[in-house]
Image (cartoon, coloured by chain):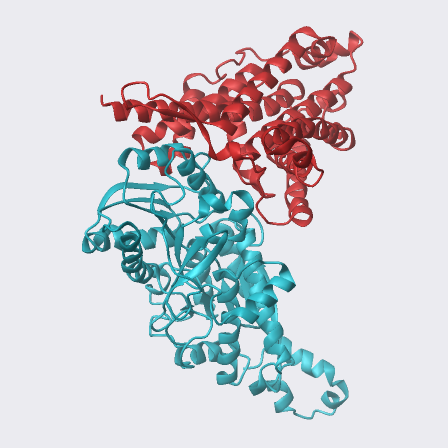
Chain colours: A cyan, B red
């Protein structure tokens, strides 16, 4: 279906012919540009991740357009439409409403960073039949029976399930004994809550782990003393620490160091990207991050070197986090869906996404570029990243790993 | 009570006192402005943000770190950021705030307040988004090894009960107390302090006595901004910041000022201190995610039981 705006634009470009009343179906069906939305936080506490997502999207669109745009639409160029989801669920929902009301010719969108934001934004995009790709983790995003949301990361529960056995292996290898006790310190955002839920319910038990500290906090923390004091009092064999805000990562890790628990004395495993962002290294020493691991939906790893190098020269980013690479990949998936759909229409693109099957994924870890009936990427894997000498290196899965996981014995 | 419980309580108490001292200093800056000028300054958190960036720039880009090192350098930068923001506050008052405050608008009453609210909210928006354009969204912090090391007090009982006092927070607490003592002495003893008090108590009578009330207001505003900038700098030694950090703290500042008693500078400090203590001690009995909710429960209780705050005056000012 051709939107009213693109029709007007095409006719406006051909006034003389329009005046003659001639019909140009090819021109009407092939717009010169196709708009893709990017609904991410560009202000407030989460502005930085949003900026990196924007970098990933811009790079992808540049590459797609340089390679001739959408061929099925006569080489139409992709155009990014930015929307600021702000720093609260309410603002994210409002931005989504603005997006569907004002940008009626969008064919798809990507967003909205935090699972909590994505949950709210998809309530709006679903009703507007706008397909939305997301890197957010919460299982709930694709558990609500929605038809227009496509989750490219492994869900939080699936990540916890994939991550735990690997972490146990590394811990056992490093210390010689299998960990028995574990502490959980998590914030209460959607992805963290969803990651911790299956751990509390069954995964810890299945791995013979006893939960000795279980603390949930509201980000951002102002001081980490009470939380770390509880860890100090119980001395667990492992700490699962799930922050979403970088400042919380810094406060907890520095406090661990201050209390003599840092630098892998208590092996620390995170979920998500916050703990491995370049910013965290800007605010604290590399020695305090050494050995900290995180299980994350995707990461710039082996095989992505040219892309990482381009990001570095173009934007000065030292490495490619999930925010960059996942959003980069999203744009390629939208482009592929447009090629399959053969028209710049959100309904057709959604249908194309549902039936897309492009084989193994290049930029997301593991699995296929194919979505199941819930909208989850089939067999989506994850990456485990570990801080080693001031760089977060991919250590799992083996085909993406750039180094081995280690924990210093202390 | 086990040794572990005693340690948990003492550790939370120490954390509360250290956090409270910085909150107290922030609140004093805001309390001074409200106390003298009766201006509700919504941009105060953002002036603090500017103070953080000023200290960070002075420390890093302007070479204080290279000259004085990472231990003393941050504190020199913070002490310089104070006067810098004092000047900024002075200019902002002269150019903007003075148009909706002071003797000229004293008669406007309600109207004056609306204009103040909208103006300071506007300044807050400009500073936040201007900060985003100028400084970017990256997190920064004034990096010092002190932020991840502590003085260990103890063990006081056998091998048990050690209290860790974070070095950067400990020094920040000492700095804030010193700043408040200097401010209190200045207000109580100096001629400038007398003119501030006079302008606060009765602007009209102060004018008749030959005091330049607008100038007194300007100095109070600039002082308030400068003090909060110092608090921001002290906070920045162990807390990373970005242009929107003011939003996280402005509510705490207001709660502190109201708790202490609107208009009381000493009260503002104790209000901030109470917030720090409630925030940290509440984690002993409540889930951690309720620590900020606990602040407002205590806040509501105090507003209900003692509406004038700890140090507030019951009578309306003349």
Question: Residue at 42% across / 27% down in the picture?
Answer: B15
Depicted B227 relative to depicted B137: above or below? above
- Residue B110 placed where, x, y %? 65, 27
Kindly tell me whether residue A217 is visible in this rendering.
yes
Residue A108 is left or right of residue A384, and the answer is right
- Residue sitting nearer the eye, B147 or B102: B147
- Residue A181 placed where, x, y %? 24, 45
Residue A116 is drawn in which quadrant?
A: bottom left
- Residue A330 placed where, x, y %? 49, 70
- Residue sitting nearer the eye, B259 or A300: A300
Residue A168 is drawn in which quadrant?
A: bottom left
Question: Residue at 41% across / 69% down in the picture?
Answer: A365
- Residue A268 placed where, x, y %? 36, 47
Depicted A229 relative to depicted A33: above or below? above
The N terminus of chain A - image quarter:
bottom right
- Residue furthest right as drawn: B210
Q: How many marks?
A: 0
Depicted A125 relative to depicted B67: above or below? below
Residue A93 is left or right of residue A208, and the answer is right
Residue B262 is drawn in which quadrant?
A: top right
The C terminus of chain A - image quarter:
top left
Residue A203 is left or right of residue B87, and the answer is left
Question: Residue at 37% across / 54% down in the picture?
Answer: A406
Depicted B194 relative to depicted A293: above or below? above
Kindly tell me whether residue B264 is visible in this rendering.
no
């Amino acid at each position: 279906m051709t939107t009213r705006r693109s029709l007007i634009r095409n006719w406006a470009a051909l006034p003389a012919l329009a005046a003659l009343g001639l019909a140009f179906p090819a021109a009407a069906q092939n717009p010169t540009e196709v708009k893709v939305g990017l609904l991410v936080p560009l202000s407030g506490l989460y502005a930085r991740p949003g900026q990196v997502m924007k970098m990933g999207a811009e790079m992808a669109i540049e590459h797609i357009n340089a390679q001739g745009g959408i061929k099925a639409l006569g080489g139409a160029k992709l155009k990014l439409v930015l929307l600021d989801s702000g720093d609260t669920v309410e603002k994210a929902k409002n931005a989504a409403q603005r997006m569907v009301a004002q940008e009626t010719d969008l064919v798809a969108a990507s967003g909205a960073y935090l699972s909590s934001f994505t949950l709210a934004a998809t309530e709006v995009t679903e009703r507007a039949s706008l397909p939305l790709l997301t890197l957010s983790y919460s299982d709930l995003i694709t558990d609500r029976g929605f038809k227009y949301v496509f989750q490219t990361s492994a869900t939080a529960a699936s990540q916890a399930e994939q991550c735990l056995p690997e972490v146990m292996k590394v811990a056992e290898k490093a210390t010689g004994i299998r960990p028995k006790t574990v502490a959980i310190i998590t914030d209460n955002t959607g992805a963290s809550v969803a990651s911790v839920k299956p751990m509390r319910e069954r995964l810890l038990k299945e791995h013979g782990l006893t939960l000795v500290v279980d603390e949930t906090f509201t980000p951002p923390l102002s001081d980490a003393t009470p939380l770390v004091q509880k860890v100090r009092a119980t001395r667990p064999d492992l700490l699962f620490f799930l922050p979403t805000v970088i400042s919380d990562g810094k406060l907890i890790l520095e406090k661990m160091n201050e209390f003599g628990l840092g630098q892998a004395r208590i092996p620390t495993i995170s979920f998500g990207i916050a703990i491995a962002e370049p910013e965290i290294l800007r605010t604290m020493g590399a020695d305090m991050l050494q050995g900290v691991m995180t299980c994350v939906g995707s990461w710039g790893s082996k095989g992505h070197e040219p892309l990482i190098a381009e990001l570095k020269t173009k934007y000065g980013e030292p490495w490619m986090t999930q925010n960059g690479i996942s959003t980069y990949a999203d744009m390629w998936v939208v482009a592929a869906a447009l090629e399959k759909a053969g028209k710049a229409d959100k309904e057709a693109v959604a249908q194309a996404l549902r039936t897309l099957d492009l084989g193994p994924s290049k930029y997301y870890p593991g699995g296929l570029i194919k979505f199941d009936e819930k909208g989850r990427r089939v067999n989506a894997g994850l990456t485990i990243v570990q801080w080693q000498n001031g760089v977060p290196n991919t250590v799992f899965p083996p085909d993406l790993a750039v180094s081995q996981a280690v924990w210093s014995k202390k | 009570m086990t040794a572990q419980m005693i340690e948990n309580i003492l550790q939370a108490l120490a954390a509360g006192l250290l956090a409270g001292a910085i909150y107290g200093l922030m609140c004093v800056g805001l309390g001074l402005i409200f106390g003298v000028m009766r201006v509700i300054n919504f941009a105060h958190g953002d002036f603090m943000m500017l103070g953080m960036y000023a200290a960070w720039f002075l420390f890093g880009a302007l070479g204080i770190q290279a000259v004085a090192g990472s231990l003393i350098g941050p504190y020199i930068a913070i002490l310089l950021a104070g006067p810098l923001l004092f000047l900024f506050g002075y200019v902002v008052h002269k150019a903007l705030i003075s148009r909706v405050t002071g003797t000229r608008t004293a008669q406007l009453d309600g109207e004056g307040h609306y204009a103040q609210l909208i103006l300071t909210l506007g300044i807050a928006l400009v500073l936040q988004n201007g900060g985003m354009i100028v400084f970017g969204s990256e997190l920064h912090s004034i990096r010092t090894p002190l932020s991840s090391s502590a003085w260990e007090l103890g063990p006081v009982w056998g091998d048990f009960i050690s209290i860790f006092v974070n070095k950067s927070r400990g020094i920040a607490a000492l700095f804030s107390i010193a700043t408040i003592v200097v401010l209190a002495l200045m207000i109580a003893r100096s001629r400038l302090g007398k003119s501030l008090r006079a302008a606060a108590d009765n602007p009209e009578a102060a004018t008749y006595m030959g005091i330049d009330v607008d100038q007194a207001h300007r100095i109070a505003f600039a002082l308030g901004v400068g003090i909060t900038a110092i608090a921001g700098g002290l906070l920045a030694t162990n807390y990373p910041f970005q242009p929107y950090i003011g939003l996280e703290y402005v509510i705490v500042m207001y709660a502190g000022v109201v708790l202490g008693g609107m208009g009381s500078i000493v009260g503002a400090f104790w209000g901030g201190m109470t917030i720090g203590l409630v925030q940290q001690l509440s984690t002993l009995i409540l889930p951690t995610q309720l620590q900020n909710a606990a602040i407002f429960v205590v806040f509501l209780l105090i507003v209900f039981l003692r509406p004038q705050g700890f140090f507030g005056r019951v009578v309306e000012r003349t």
